[in-house]
Amino acid sequence: MKKVLVTGGAGFIGFHLAKSLSENHEVTIVDNFSRSKKDAELEKLLEKENVSFIKLDLTDKNELTQLDSFDFVYHLAAINGTENFYTIPDKVIKVGILGTINLLDWFVEQKKGKFLFSSSSETYAGTMKLLKENFPIPTPENIPLTIDDPKNPRWSYGASKIMSEVTIHSYAHLHDFDYSIIRFHNIYGPRMGFQHVIPEFIKRILRKENPFQIFGGQETRTFCFIDDAVKATKLVMQSGKKGETYHIGRSDEEIKIIDLAKKLFSIAGVNPEIKFNDAPEGSVKRRCPDITKLSSLGYNPEVKLDQGLKETFDWYKTFFENKN
C-alpha cells in the first residue's frame, strides 16, 4: 500500500482521484476550501481508515511542515473558473505558481517518490490564435505554449500553468527526481461544481429555461468522463516514464456545443426554443487533444458521451431536488 498525497483533493477531479486511490492506498487529502467544501461525499470518504485530511494553504510554506513523506504526490490544487481569472487573478497566480514552488521545495527535501502535476489545455490556448489554420487538431503535447495577451487577467490561470510546467522541469533538472505532467481537457461528471458548460446547461434545463440561451454554439469540444480521466491520471503516475507530458481527454466524439445542449434536452425529456447569442469574446473554435501518447501506456476511454451525460444529469437532478 503506497502513501499518496492529493493536493486540491476536495475539488472535482481531486476528490474522484482520491476516492479511487483509497481502494488500495493510504491517501492524504490536502485542501484549503477556497473553492470546494466538505460536503457529504467528502465526509463519507474521510470515514475510511486509510484516508486522512489536512487543511493547508500551499502558498504558506510554513504550513507544509504538517506533511509526512509520500510515495506518490498528485498536485492538482489550483483556482480555476473563468470568473475567478478576472476577479481574483492575484490569488490565481499565487496559488498556481507559489503553491507549486513551495510544494516542490518540500518534495525535493523528502528525496523519494514521484511528483505528478496537473496542467491544462489553457497552456496552448494562445497558440491557437498564433498559428490559426496551421494549428494541429487533434493537438499533441509538443505544441508551443504561448500567452496571447499578458495584459488580459484571463491569462492568470494559463500563465501560472505554463510557469509551473517550466518550474517543474527546471527543479527536476537540478534535483533529478521522478515526475510527470498531465494536461486535462474538458473533464466532466458528478460533483464538478457549476462553472462549467455541462452543469450550467443542466441547471438551466432543470429550471425550465425557455427560450434556452446558447452563446455561440458552433464551437466544438471533446469531453472526457471523470472515471476515464482518473484512470488515465493513475496510469501516468504508475508508468515507468520519467519527465513526460501527457494530454488527458478524448480524441473522438467531438461535438458542437449546440448538439451537446440537444443531448441534454433529450435526456431531460424537454424541447425548448433555442435563442442564439454571440459567442463570448476569445472563445476557441475547436479543442481536441491528441491522446496517442497516453494510449501507448494502455489508456482506452470507456465511458461514451451519452452514458456520461446521463450519469452527470442524474447526479445534478438529485442534488437540486435535495437542495430544494
Image (cartoon, rainbow, N blue to C red):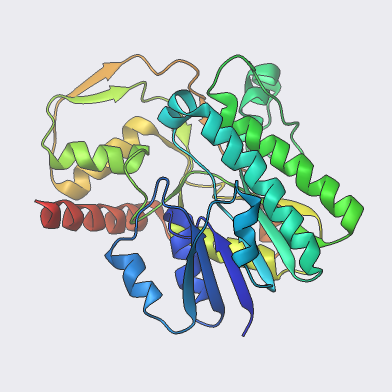
* Residue 141 in sight in this render: no
Residue 113: image location, x then y, percent: 75, 70
* Residue 73 at x, y percent in the picture: 65, 64
The outermost residue toward the front is 62
The residue at the point 74 percent across, 66 percent down is 114
Q: Residue at x 41, y 18 (%)?
A: 280
Q: Nearer the viewer, residue 69 or 193?
A: 69
Residue 44 lies left or right of residue 95; in this view the side is left
Residue at left offset 48%, top offset 22% = 283
> Is residue 282 depicted above or below 64 in this figure?
above
**Residue 170 % position (x, y):** 84, 45
Task: Tally the marks.
Answer: 0
Whether 248 is drawn above or below 242: the answer is: above
Indicate the quadrant where residue 205 lies. top left
Question: From the viewer's perspective, is 203 left or right of 152?
Answer: left
The front one of 142 and 46 is 46
Query: Looking at the picture, does residue 304 appear above or below residue 216?
Result: below
For the N terminus, the image quarter is bottom right
Q: Residue at x 45, y 71 (%)?
A: 19
Residue 221 visible here: yes
The answer to whether residue 232 is above or below residue 250 is below
Please indicate whether residue 7 sits to the left or right of residue 198 in the image: right
Question: Could you tell me residue 172's position as x and y percent?
Answer: 84, 54
For the residue pair 157 and 251, the one nearer the viewer reads as 157
